[in-house]
Amino acid sequence: MVNTDELRKTAKEIVEREDVKYVIGYEKGTYGCRISPSFAFSPEDADKFVFSPLCVQNLAVYPLLEEKLPLKRGEEEDMRKVGIVVKGCDSRAVAQIFQEKGLDREDVILIGVCCTGVIDLKKLATQFPEPLEGLEVTEENGNFVLTANGITKTIPKEELLLRTCIHCENPTPVVYDVLLGEEVAPSKEDYQKVKELEEKSLEEKWEYWEKKFERCIRCYACRNVCPLCYCKECMVDHLSPQWVRRSVNLSENAAWNIMRAFHLAGRCIGCGACEQACPVDIPLMEINKKLEKDMKELFDYEAATEEEKSLLTMFKPDDPGEFIL
Amino acid sequence: MEKMILKKKNLPEFVEKALKEYRVIAPTDNEGIIVFKEITNPSEMMLNYANTRIPAKSVLLQQTETLFTFSQGKTVAVTSPEVNDKTLIVGLRPCDAQSLAILDHVFGGDYSDPYVEKRENTILVGLTCLNPEITCFCTSTGGGPSCAEYTDVQLTDIGENYYVEVVTDKGKTLTERASGLFAPAAEADERKKKELEEKAQNAITRTMHTDGIAEKLEEIFESPFWRKIALKCLGCAACTYVCPTCHCFDMQDETAGTRGARIRVWDSCMYPEYTVHASGHNPRPERMNRVRNRVYHKFNYFPKNCNVIACVGCGRGIEVCPVNVDIIDVIDKAREVNL
Amino acid sequence: MTTTETSVTGAPNPYVPQLAEIDEVFDEVIGERAIKTFRFSFCDEKVQNQFTFMPGQCVMVSAMGEGECMFALSSSPTETDYLEVSVMKLGKVTSVLHDYEPGDIIGVRGPYGNGFDVKGWKGKNIITVGGGIGQPPLRSLIWYILDNRKDYGKLDVIYGARTSNDLSFKQEFFDLEKRNGVDVHLSIDVEEDGWTRFVGFVPDNLLAVAPSPENAVAITCGPPIMIHFVIQNLLKLGFTDEQIYTTLEMRMKCGIGKCGRCNIGNVYVCKDGPVFSYAQLEKMKGER
């Protein structure tokens, strides 16, 4: 577990630096089990920082969401750095963005936190339906120990973890300026759910996904919460030509979800933020993981590497091509 | 107000009778997500739920709706659809019913939107809330878990039976047609109902202080407070689509060859494209502008125009926001802001 | 000219347009930021005969299959045989409209908005200050006044554009220069061969004309930056907040105050505007 005092001390040191605008971390949310992203502009702000298995959000989304305000006459752009608290997966998102030149390494200061997995709030609501006011979470022997309102429950981690955490291959941040907590041994992703789906017949797959895509309300929470979705104009907002209609129906919803997954092929770092954010519980990671598996098998490629170029921005003569020939 | 009981085991028969005359819409379970859908069988109804993920506005202001169809070529013809037949919405919560009363202000008036006729043809059978969620705060917005002001008939689950309040004449026509299924309520029934209602009322732990909020907001429009609040907002539309009182929509033409339709779809003021002009100018260029606009629309602009805040305290927005932008927190903090 | 058969049927709802046929298309400005005036009349004669509006009001014009835009009517309501809108080619729908020719069918619904207070302004001196594509609603007002001449006092028309090629209704205003009962003051931003009138920005032309605020109302429409300086200069000339009017524009979809997007504070520009007095504008909280 990450020591809270150490986290706050580190954040304060960084926020006090002259070349830093602010530091983004997590703070206690407004009710129950919620955690909120926290923007620290001063050491006092940084005193609110926390880190626990409830810190679900991928904060790497914020540097590219930052809006550039119009400059007043004579004013110069504020080029100072932004500090971000990043878990293993979050750091991979930042690494992928570096590779794509979305951000420069000098733009950010990364406070890496070694992560032992975050809790899926939807699973928590089922396992602990009582009011979660004042929730405290600790880990013990492969269990989460949760205390709220005088009630304590010990639940095996696997029953509460965000799906993508169960076989996390990068619990220790891959890029950081400071590392907090003890390094965590990685797991191996077994793609079990993807394989299950791959076995299904075409009809079964359609039936499976129809029920899900029917629910989609095209709120684009999945897109906005994803650190790798940072196109200035998203394909769904393009009007001439209009790639995806605004009509909300099975056809357009399927197009949206599948197209987004393809735009993330080789770029998605598997944090699961999209799945957690979806208000209608579409199992988005099943599609993203399928493409992740394909990238490994077809191109022996993973997101967030040190390569100079992203895989899908180049080609090699020996790229697999059964789909053409 | 007429007070009766309906045995729980008679509810399916009541719905069967209704299905003969009305299009019946009820909460249904899509893999754990409860949404309003048209049912053809009482077994499709799911009444054991806290609240639907998508509010009842989705029935009267569908997410995608055809305003008219057109065909071009030698003849240019425009055809607008007939409005739906009589509809019955069964099992909506008091907050959703209250939201329809708020949306009435928007869609009525000088130009009568298709919503208006649909609303007139719709009967609301509400279901009292016995287990409010941690995010609920309807008691702060002029409603409550057992509020029956905005429905035509209100059901309260008192164990083996439903306690039935017939609120309006519209509701009376509905219950009269199935009068055999109802029996007069006894005092014990009424006591049980009151007991459960009180328990539900007390279970609501969160409050939003709404008195004088429109006036307070009037003072602090220029405050840097809004920039702070908007920092974490991602600009998705999750809050607006699950909100029962949000009503913004877009209109677009969709064509296939020479035929087409002008459709309207839910839109969100949180998207930057919402207000961008053809010239490229955007009156609300930053997230700060859009977040502030949304809060003001619900707690200042709408009250100025219609004398009621456009929030029913259902808590859906608080629940679905991925980054915990919490309207109760925003309003409470706004009250403390001094310019 | 072939006349297409048209029909509008089904349950009435406020979003259904009437169909109109384009009678004539006038090129006002050619080239970059082209402006065309479309003269059209409703296919259903009854609709044409019953359609009335006040200057300053707008209509939603549809290019069926592309979309709709809100345009201020640039013809005067005193003209009953047809309607005119002047359209600048800028985005998706306007680009398609610019390809339309006489005989083509468009959808039209309206009139929407509050229009100019022509009743309240009776007996007053009117000064219109227009720039570029802001002139169309003012043209409607100008012709309305000319067709009801004895109801109004002095009429000053101040209108300018970047170059003489960017002046809309150019010949019309050249002709009006010679007419009694109206004083026309045209301008272009930069000197041009053969241009003997004022050279400079519209706000400066306004100062040169220096109309008296006595019993007067000034209405200005044009690019936001021009409006800013025009209002400044009107105040300098002694006009009060209540004597100055302008029109605002916003992205619009429903045009009837329901879709939510054109609001400035609690005011909807489509329904409560587009005409606002400067006094109103100053009180309006909200982004524009």
Image (spheres, coloured by chain):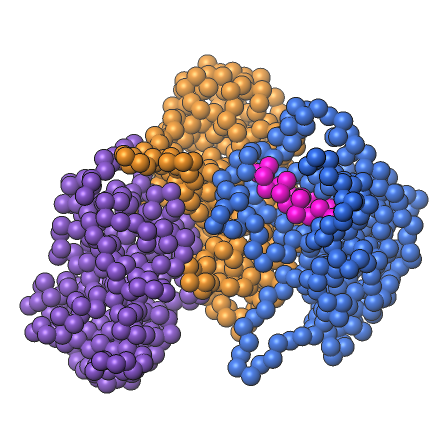
Chain colours: A blue, B orange, C purple
Residue at 29% over, 65% down: C29
Q: Residue B23, located in which quarter of the rendered image?
A: top left
| Magenta span contains residue A276 | yes
Answer left or right for B172 relative to B27.
left
The relative height of residue B298 versus residue A10 in the rendered view (above or below) is above
Residue at 81% over, 55% down: A305
Residue C81 % position (x, y): 13, 50
Residue B278 % position (x, y): 42, 59
Residue at 37% over, 54% down: C95
Residue B166 % position (x, y): 44, 28
Residue A298 % position (x, y): 78, 41
Foreground: C54 or A70? A70
Answer left or right for C124 relative to C18.
left
Foreground: A272 or B204? A272
| Residue C133 in view, yes or no | yes
Answer left or right for B337 relative to C71.
right
| Residue A153 in view, yes or no | no
- Specify start and end residues of the magenta stretch as a single range: A253-279
